[in-house]
Image (spheres, rainbow, N blue to C red):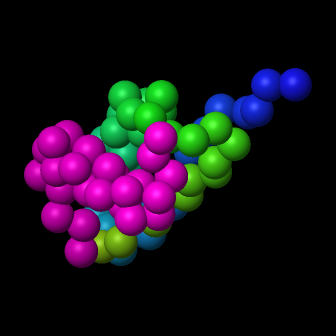
Amino acid sequence: MKPAKARFGVSIVKKTGTAVKRNRFRRLAREAFRLNQNRIKDGIDIIVSIQPDCAWKNFIDAEKDFLKLCEKAEILT
């Protein structure tokens, strides 16, 4: 049986800002995962918790932070 692909979830607190801002952070995190999903080991579950002091200005910042955390957790292939 083939191992399951990596799965991804996002948690974000209301103190982060308006619904528009929270949804933007959520979309950026999901896109960073989607574009790098093939680099993550199979069977891994990832939950990202976005805090009020999140400083992402654009997708490049989000992807850079996501990959840095994946490297630190040693889940990249």
What is the magenta range?
A: 53-77
Where residue 38 appears, as percent x and y from the top left, is 48, 28
Vertical comparison of 40 with 61: above or below = above
**Would you place residue 69 above or below residue 51 in this image?**
above
Q: Nearer the viewer, residue 67 or 33?
A: 67
Rendered residue at 34%/39% (across/down): 32
Query: Which quadrant of the figure has residue 58?
Result: top left
Looking at the image, which is closer to me, 2 or 52? 2
Residue at horizontal 65%, vertical 32%? 5
Residue at the far front in the pictured view:
77
Q: Quadrant of residue 14?
A: bottom left
Residue 37 appears left or right of 57: right
Q: Residue at x 16, y 50 (%)?
A: 61
Residue 77 visible at all: yes
The image quarter in which residue 68 lies:
bottom left
Residue sitting at the far top: 1
- Please tell me which residue lies in front, 63 or 54: 63
